[in-house]
Image (cartoon, rainbow, N blue to C red):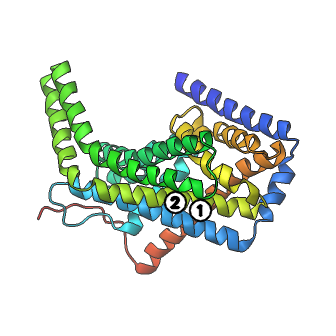
Amino acid sequence: MRQAFRIATLVSISTGLIYLLISRAGLTWADIVISIHKIPGWALALFVALSGANLALGARKWLIVLRTTAPGPESGPGLTEAMLTSALGELLGQVMPVQAGIAVARSLASHLNIGPSLRANLGTTLYEQLFDLIVVGIAAVAGVLGLVLHAGALGWVPFILIWALGSMVLSLKLPTMLAAQAYRVGRLLGKPGLISEIQNTSRSVSALSTVPAQLAVLSMVRYLTNLLRLVVLLGALGMWSQAIPAMIGLPLVQIIGVVPVTPGNLGVTEWTWSAVLVSSGATIGKAALFALAARVVNVVALSILVLIFLGYQIVQGTTMNWSWREK
């Protein structure tokens, strides 16, 4: 009962934030529907394609982590299967933290005895997404430095290099940092069972020390697909002039999105986008329209991709095979 009340409260807050944004912007639901309906077909197709590439990169990262830490895997989920569950997870991320949504979706297969456990999926999902967080965090730092120093068009080149090099260096250090922290926690708590578990985790992290460069590169390319999706949607809504400010503000929106204030951060993300765009010269109406359209178009793109992946499974006559066999 208490949990139901909490969920109802958070949903009410989300709904209230969306209502306030629409009211403050002087929009109606009809305005939002019309603006989305006017998005050109080429823009929607390109957005879906970029979303597919984004999912493929994230799924590939997860498979690298899973196969590195698994005990001699010879078979397991294929890329299409991993992309399908990632797409379902991001849809769940509209009502819960996206990291948890992806882990839950990836674990649906385990309840059918055809995939890794929820615990394994949660741990590997959080680990591979740490590299995304590093890339986003360094991008935020580089963006702030560029704004403070009033970088021009070519002046952004050094800050892009800071982003690329900083992301790679920190990513390479991540496994060692995590292993050291796991050891310290084990010694501090002094619980035999917990120490054993932490040592197992440390060994897994040590095994992952061979792949951080791959994960870093995939995360950086994935971040670039997010930037391209952003530009495509801005162009489709006739907001080309906001492309650079929005690209600089993207890390801020993503970092805030990590903290689950409301289900799927509904309302919070939209207000954050509106603040970013208004601060760069957009009207509140245009900013709110973009923020709301971005949510809807993303859900539509993910839904299309889920149908495509499911259709591929049916055409190929395959079932999801997430079993792991010893060599």
Query: Pointer 1: what residue?
Result: 228
| x 18%, y 39%: residue | 202
Q: Quadrant of the C terminus?
A: bottom left
- Front residue of 121/201: it is 201
| Residue 326 versus residue 41 in the image, above or below | above
Q: What x and y, as percent, mark residue 9?
A: 64, 26
Quadrant of the rendered image containing residue 133: top left
Confirm whether residue 65 shows in the render: yes
Q: CA distance from mark 2 to mark 1?
A: 6 Å
Residue 241, position in %: x, y?
A: 75, 57
- Left or right, 14 with respect to 210, comes to right
Tell whether label 1 touches label 2 (CB within 8 Å). Answer: yes
Q: Is residue 61 above or below residue 128?
A: below
Q: Is residue 324 left or right of residue 166?
A: left
Q: Secondary structure at mark 1?
A: helix
Horizontal arrangement in the rendering, residue 162 relative to residue 128 (left or right): right
Q: Secondary structure at mark 2?
A: helix
Q: Which of the pair 249/20 is nearer the observer?
A: 249
Q: Position of residue 281 (x, y in %)?
A: 78, 45
User: For the residue carrying disc 2, how many other residues have a C-alpha within 10 Å: few (<14), some (14-19), or many (20+)?
Assistant: some
In which image quadrant can residue 82 be found? bottom left
Q: Residue at x 79, y 61 (%)?
A: 238
Q: Closest to the observer: 103 or 277?
A: 277
Q: Which residue is mark 2?
A: 224
Tell me the residue at 35%/58% (across/down): 61
Residue 158, percent from left and from top = 50, 53
Residue kind at label 1, given as amino acid type = Leu
